[in-house]
Amino acid sequence: MGSEDIVREFTICGNHVTVHVPAHCADEGLLDSERYGRCPQQQACNSRDQHADDNGRNEGYALEPSCGQEHTGARSRQHTDRANPSPSNGLPVVYLHVHDGDGSEVLRLCHELGCRQFVLAAMRPRCWNDDLTPWECSGLFADDAPFAGKAAEQLRLLESEIIPRVEGDAPRKPEQRVLAGYSLAGLFATWATFNSTAFGLVASASGSLWYPDFAGYAAASEFARKPASAYFSLGSKEARTPSRLLRNVAQGTHDVVELFKARGVPTAFEQNPGNHFKDPALRMAKGIAWALGR
């Protein structure tokens, strides 16, 4: 992450969004709480939800009590009085769902890899297991809660609320939009290619392409917008797991990669050493750098 990045944060419908903008591309001004404020969907959110990793081990965490309670703010790495950054100069914007944190480590590694400048919108969803899965599925282990399959709702929120807040002040539309993600977020990014025209590039690092029936769904579906390119990666040991579902990840990834190639999408597949939890930020950064380097 550059030392002069401007960072803006807002929360909408349980999603905490951190926007990292290169300082030379940020507008000056005051943060407009009306523009970045309340979600028009005033449904109540649960006061607690479940966060989980791909081992299915859930960890509860507290949430905002309702979608209507939104929080905004902005900060600079050097100037705390600078606010309201927005993408300008047509820079690419990368939308990245994160399990935790604010995407700073991924951004730092992208810079170390020599990636071109871009705006990063790191989105921490209300419930990782529910909001990023395309349909319901039983939990990975006997005592785990099922996956709720709310990806369509998350995609609507992303398209109708998050993207306008991130890009609303930009004098020009971004040069490119990338939808990126690790694990279930990689599954979401891949699934979105069949359901959204908002993104031109996809980067799925160690994506959960083991998800039941996903490869068949992809084969039977048309792209909503044919990606300009697609990146996939997987750890060499990810299929070595006691979970019957997770064992399918290598075959599922292979099937999706071959499908994208067969449909004429410039597609990269990279195998990384280790299991699902080895170097996730670096794996994600490599995917973003490849997508923006084409």
Image: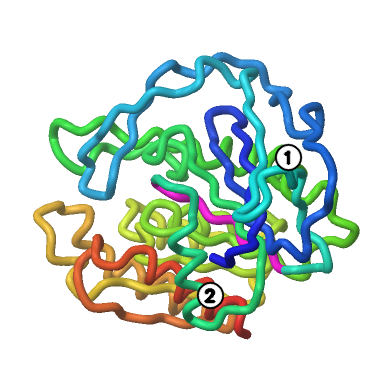
Q: State how far apart marks 2 and 1 are (Cα).
A: 30 Å
Disc 2 is placed on an element classified as helix
Q: Residue 253: horizontal and vertical position, in percent? A: 36, 70
Tell me, yes or no, whether the highlighted magenta stretch contains residue 95.
yes
Q: Label for residue 111? A: 2
- Residue 73, picture quadrant: top right
From this viewpoint, is residue 58 visible? yes
Decide which of tag 2 and tag 1 comes sooner along the chain. Answer: 2
- Residue type at the position of mark 2: His
> In the visual, does 134 lie left or right of 263?
left
Q: Please report the bounds of the magenta region as a residue range.
A: 92-99
- Predominant secondary structure in magenta? strand
- Residue 187, picture quadrant: bottom left
Disc 1 is placed on an element classified as helix
- 123 or 86: nearer the viewer: 86
Q: Residue 43: horizontal and vertical position, in percent? A: 61, 16
